[in-house]
Image (tube, grey):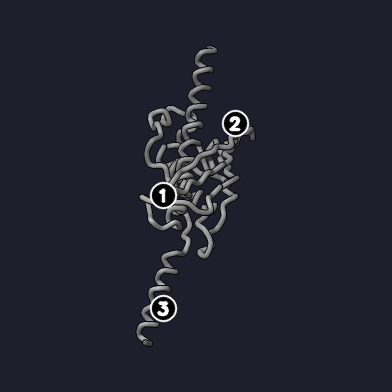
Amino acid sequence: MNSAIKKLAAVIGLAMLSACASPAEFQNMTVTEGVDTAQAETSAYHGNITVSRVNGGEETNPMWTSEISSQAFEKALIASLENTGLLSKLEGDAPYELRVTLLEVDQPIFGLDLTVKTLIRYEVIDKQSGKTIFDQNIPADHTATFGDSPFAIQRLRLANEGAAKNNIAAFIDMLIDEDAELSGEKVAST
């Protein structure tokens, strides 16, 4: 009888450990493909951006839900900018400074398919003039299905990571596209 209770307690303990929420991991939020790197290479931002501030993220409470921390998002953003060639190797001497605020991370409470929606503000400042040259609130989402993980806590983390990754990719695409449009206008006007 005592042995059965110990086994049951061990099984319940393991189940509780596997049910703990884990934070979004930066490597799963990092953009590694899907961005037009050839266009990024011709952008004025190529090798010229430094990340100065990321805030608005939340730390994960293991007994509650997975969250996206500011630190993990910053690491993912820096790695993504590096992967696309936009990150400056000069840090302090980069002509453009990027400030980011996680405005909303909208998470479902329950469901088989969990969709997380993010709204993140990106500001690019020209350090020489002090002017904000890009200021957008970018929405993005991602759905994690039961096929991705049978555990809701893991599905929520996967949805967080996917939404953050999609948001970073959308920012990079918008920034590069806007620069290409401005460059086209400059060429057309000359």
* Within-10-Å neighbours for mark 3: few <14, some 14–19, many 20+: few
Up-down relation of residue 19 to residue 174 (above or below): below
Up-down relation of residue 8 to residue 53 (above or below): below
Give the foreground label among 3 and 1.
3
Up-down relation of residue 42 to residue 142 (above or below): above
Label 1: which residue?
Answer: 28
Residue at 44 percent across and 56 percent down: it is 152
Give the foreground label among 1 and 2.
1
Q: Quadrant of residue 16?
A: bottom left
Q: Quadrant of residue 120?
A: top right
Q: Is residue 126 visible?
A: no
118 sits left or right of 33 in the view: right
How many angstroms separate mark 2 from mark 3 (CA)? 59 Å
Query: Which residue is nearer to you in this view: 95 or 142?
Result: 142
Residue at 50 percent across and 46 percent down: it is 116
Mark 3: which amino acid?
A: Ala
Secondary structure beneath disc 2? strand
Secondary structure beneath disc 3? helix
Q: Is residue 65 visible?
A: yes
Q: Position of residue 64 (x, y in %)?
A: 53, 61
Q: Does the residue at mark 1 contact the one at mark 2 (Cβ under 8 Å)?
A: no
Q: Residue furthest bottom?
A: 2
Label 2: which residue?
Answer: 133
Q: How many marks?
A: 3
Give the foreground label among 2 and 3.
3
